[in-house]
Amino acid sequence: MADDSMTFDPRAVSTGAPASGISNDKEISDEMFRLLVSSVKDYAIFMLDTEGHVMTWNEGAERIKGYAPDEIIGKHFRTFYEQDAVESRHPEHELELAASTGRYEEEGWRLRKDGSLFWANVVITALRNEKGTLIGFSKVTRDLTERKQAEQLREETLRLINESNEELQRLAYVVSHELQAPIYTIARYCNLLSARYRDRLGADANEFIDKITSSSALVARMVDDIWVYARVARPNIERETVYIGRVLDDALAELHADSGNCDVIRGELPSLPGNRSQLVYLFKELVSNAIKYRSEEKPRIHIGCSEEDGGFLFEIEDNGIGIDSVYKNDVFKLFHRLDGGPDAESTGMGLAICKKIVTQHNGKIWLQPQEKGAKFCVWLPAR
């Protein structure tokens, strides 16, 4: 007959072990868990008593913090904190928060045994018995120094880039401002030479005067474009809701007589967030480009728009001489000019400025190859 006094334990069924072996199973389980924790190398995992003294120490803790078990067990975990944190009782505050909420997590600098610092992710968990009494804390620390250093390097790189951009903008302003006077002087004296001495110094002199005059005019335009590019490249541009139909009107008005010698056909144009003056420059340059590369026909420019991918796709298409598809990427580079033709008097900066404007508006611009004429596509976000 079975002994009615024997107590049934469900763990005996799940493990296949008799009830009498329960304590042995628990001891084995605890030992396996202890061995598992002690063998972890990438995390410092250890126990604290209710006051914050170190009770256990695993291999990961020794690797990360540098202390052997007999050097740290029994000491308060404030040992891992810098002096200002100790004086402000930050370690004790962490335990108070963990005790009140059950868990506390933060990232910050911690001390190794050799006095060096490492960036730690720390998780402290309050441990309570079946009655809810606090019996200690578990503390898991991960060394994230490499990630922190990468973040700091990225932040420093961004800071240096921003400083460099600011210096370049100041340089562009100084260069454009300081060069205007001497360039103006050169142009003015060339005009005086032409007015007073043309045809009196011989054909060569006439040619020399013309070359100096045209070159000084080109340099003056280039200086102006450098300043425009620097201004466009500034971060945090002002934005407002802009009606592109009005932007196009202003662009055509700035082109004056040039736009009067062409037909501009426009579709329905939207409103979108952007910098008004920059968008006027964008459309003025694209229309001007179509006029400049005209064929024998009267320039005919079609500007259409459609909604696409959460934004607006503008297509500026003309019937001009077109641009060879091999140059579809080069045309947006600074100072890129084709040999001869309309580009002979170009600064090579117009489309580079257009690309910078579109980039500042979080958009895209590209040249769409055509059998006849050219088509520029501009995508700008609706929000």
Image (spheres, rainbow, N blue to C red):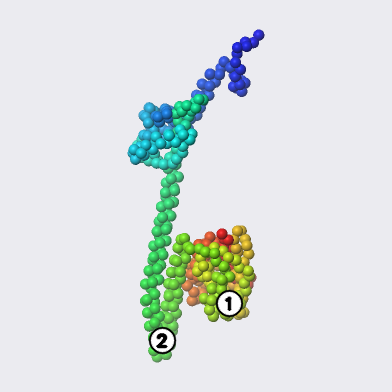
Q: Secondary structure at mark 1?
A: loop
Name the residue nearer the viewer: 39 or 327.
39
The crowding category of the residue bearing disc 1, from other C-alpha atoms within 10 Å (few below 14, some 14 to 19, many at least 20), is many
Name the residue nearer the viewer: 327 or 119.
119
Residue 158 in percent (x, y) is at: 43, 55
Residue picked out by circle 1: 294
Q: Looking at the picture, which amino acid does disc 2 mark?
A: Ser
Determine if residue 216 is in view: yes
Residue 97 in percent (x, y) is at: 44, 36
Residue 236 in percent (x, y) is at: 47, 60
Task: Identify the residue shown where x is 37% and y is 37%.
Answer: 89
Residue 348 in percent (x, y) is at: 49, 71
- Among the two numbered marks 1 and 2 on one chain, the one whose residue lies closer to the N terminus: 2
Tell me: residue 277, above or below residue 112: below
Extreme residue in the bottom direction: 200
Tell me: residue 1, above or below residue 265: above
The answer to whether the residues at label 1 and label 2 have Cβ atoms under 8 Å apart is no
Task: Identify the residue shown where x is 61% and y is 21%.
Answer: 10
- Alpha carbon separation for disc pair 1 and 2: 31 Å
Residue 194: numbered disc: 2
